[in-house]
Image (spheres, rainbow, N blue to C red):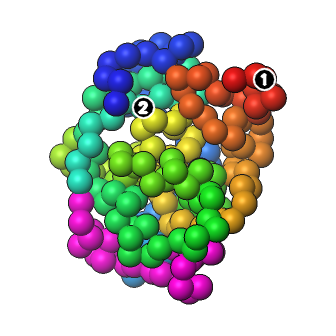
Amino acid sequence: MRGDALPPGQREARGWPLSHYGPVPRFRPERWNLQVFGATASGGKHSWTFDEVTALPTATITADLHCASGTSTFGHEFFGVPAAVLLELAPPAPAVTHVMAWAEYGYSANLRLADFAAERTLLATHHGGEPLTVEHGFPLRLVVPHLYGYKGPKWLRGIEYMTRDRRGFWEERGYHNTADPWAEQRYAYQEDEPG
């Protein structure tokens, strides 16, 4: 955590701006589940209802959020299930290198397994001590504070374990595959630039 420091090319925004692609989904608890699938160690699919997700071990983190559009906001308190808990309950096969985070309406974001497994990566249910608002991702939002925001989808529904990388929604549309804000990894054309 860098704490109140602006990555290069960023400016501070007030409040918590809303940004998402497509409509806000309606939460139907009787139909909702979170799935882990793909190259699992067991070869099977894992699934939890919302009540089962909220009964899993939890943590609270304070995180800064950085948008690839150039805005940053500071000091967000998120509460939820650490990604490490999911990895323990539904382990990936040894060959897994990446995950795809799937959200409502087919939105997706690819991550390196190490980024998903990072200590501060969280499947958040709450922000600032209150349940997430639907506009900010209720019932479940992936928070990956060390990457640009498009790597942390709202309305999370699934984690797919992958043995090779595959681009997600914004990555297919020209955004950087890694998305480190401290290296200003905003756009795909930068992937060929020397590090």
Which residue is label 1 attached to? 193
Q: Is residue 4 above or below residue 149?
A: above
Q: Which mark is residue 65?
A: 2
Please state the horizontal and vertical placement of residue 44, each as a whole percent of the image.
56, 86
Dot 2 alpha-carbon crowd within 10 angstroms: few under 14, some 14 to 19, many 20 or more: many
Please state the horizontal and vertical placement of residue 10, each as a whole percent of the image.
51, 15
In the picture, which quadrant includes the N terminus?
top left
Query: So how many labels did they put on this image?
Result: 2
Q: Quick check: is 27 in the magenta stretch?
A: no
Residue at 69% in and 23% down: 195
The residue at the far front in this view is: 94
Please state the horizontal and vertical placement of residue 144, each as a whole percent of the image.
45, 44
The stretch of residues the image draws in magenta is: 36-58
Residue at 32% in and 71% down: 53
Residue at 46% in and 63% down: 26
Tag 1, which secondary structure? loop
Q: Is residue 14 above or below residue 55?
A: above
Three-letter amino acid code at disc 2?
Leu
Tag 2, which secondary structure? strand
Which picture quadrant has residue 61?
top left
The residue at the far left in this view is: 129
Three-letter amino acid code at disc 1?
Glu
Earlier residue among tags 2 and 1 = 2
Check if mark 2's residue and mark 1's residue have beta carbons within 8 Å: no
> In this view of the protein, which residue sits in the foreground, 18 or 66?
66
Dot 1 alpha-carbon crowd within 10 angstroms: few under 14, some 14 to 19, many 20 or more: few
Which picture quadrant has residue 159?
bottom right
Horizontal side, residue 117 vs residue 79: left or right: right
Q: Which mark is residue 151?
A: none
Please state the horizontal and vertical placement of residue 18, each as a whole percent of the image.
46, 35
Q: Quick check: is 57 in the magenta stretch?
A: yes
